[in-house]
Amino acid sequence: MTLGLVCDACDTLSPLSATLCSTCGAALGSKTVPGPSPAPRSCPNCGSEIPGQHRFCGFCGARSDGADLRPVWLAGPSTKTRLVLVGTDGQDSLSFPLTDGEHVAGRLEGAVMFPEDRLLSPRHATFVLQAGKLWVRDDGSHNGVYIRLRAPKIVPSGTLLLIGEQLIRVESALPDVLPYPDHEGTYFYCSPHRTARLTLVQFLTGGDVGLIYRSRGDTVTIGRELNDVNFPEDPYISGRHAQIVALEDGRFQITDLGSKNGTFEKVPKIVQLFSGDQLLLGQQLLRIELG
């Protein structure tokens, strides 16, 4: 372990015998008369409270004693391509400029970092900008990346959707199974098993299965009331929110019915992004702006 004196002005470590800092020339080891403690302030990087006398954030390690307290990701080359964080009030918040190359987003890694969002994986996704085109790649995150539908879209069986607070998987209904008796020839008493075209599976906290809805028709509407599937206690779902239509080839057409908060589809692995697209990473809503 190296022992020495740390300069209060520039943090340079000098020998114990030194009286002046070799870097900035400030006096070392001088005593100052204590004054009033500075007021606490917010970390410019993660928003945590920092005691007034501290120069670094105890949560994320960012330095916060400079005059410019903008978030660290705002510093960088001037570019018109950026990610815009949309606040809970619908207003634009932080801006993340993107230059050619890869930009990692996550809870603990990357330039686009949200340390307090526990729904984000440490390394969640990567934005790739090349020749003016932008892609997002899911880096094996636990909860995935979701993109808001801007037009009706045809998706395969097994697609995951975010509708309000509901995580729903749409899939083809299993073939009809005829009832069969046990080894004594007795049939199990049950509800009638009717033919279905599509199945909706709701996932609860922790991945447990909640509601399972089997539709006998080709079309299912989802919303807060007067639909085939209703979630009356979900404040983020519109009255008539989304529609799912089963196609003859086993795929489905998903249509947002003009809902306020949109219908989001989970990105399979990588997808190209366009200006105006909206993404959900964890609890963060990001809008794409291409220069």
Image (cartoon, rainbow, N blue to C red):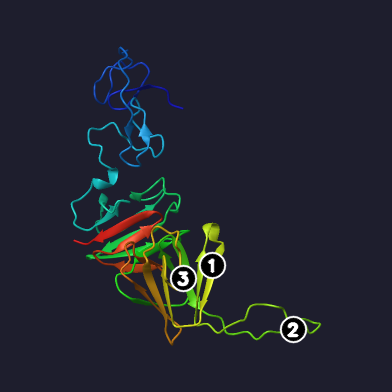
- Asked whether residue 174 is in view, the answer is yes
Q: In the rendering, at what x and y percent does residue 176 appear?
A: 59, 85
Alpha carbon distance from label 3 to label 2: 33 Å
Occupied quadrant, residue 5:
top left
Please tell me whether residue 255 is drawn above or below residue 61 in the rendered image: below
Say above or below: 284 vs 274.
Answer: above
Upstream in sequence: badge 1 or badge 3: 1
**Residue for point 56% across, 65% down:** 209
Spot occupied by residue 200 in the image (x, y as percentages of width and height): 49, 72
Across and down, in percent, residue 80 comes to 19, 57
Q: Name the residue under label 1.
A: 211
Tell me the mark number nearer the camera, choosing from 1 and 3. 3
Residue at image mark 2: 181
Give the residue number, with chain letter if any, for mark 3: 229
Do the CB atoms of the residues marked 1 and 3 lie less than 8 Å apart? Answer: yes
**For the residues carrying marks 3 and 2, which lies nearer the camera in this image?**
3
Question: First in sequence: mark 2 or mark 1?
Answer: 2
Left-right relation of 202 to 123:
right
Q: How many labels does the image show?
A: 3
Q: In front here: 225 or 2? A: 225
**Element at badge 2?**
loop
Q: Residue at x 27, y 56 (%)?
A: 83
Q: Nearer the viewer, residue 174 or 15?
A: 174
Residue in the picture at 51% in, 70% down: 201
What is the distance, in whole Å, between disc 1 and disc 3 at their CAs?
10 Å
Question: Any mark on residue 119, and which?
Answer: none
Q: What residue type is labelled 3?
A: Val
- State the separation of the CA atoms marked 2 and 1: 27 Å
Residue at 72% x, 79% y: name it: 188
Mark 2 Cα-neighbour bin, 10 Å: few <14, some 14–19, many ≥20: few
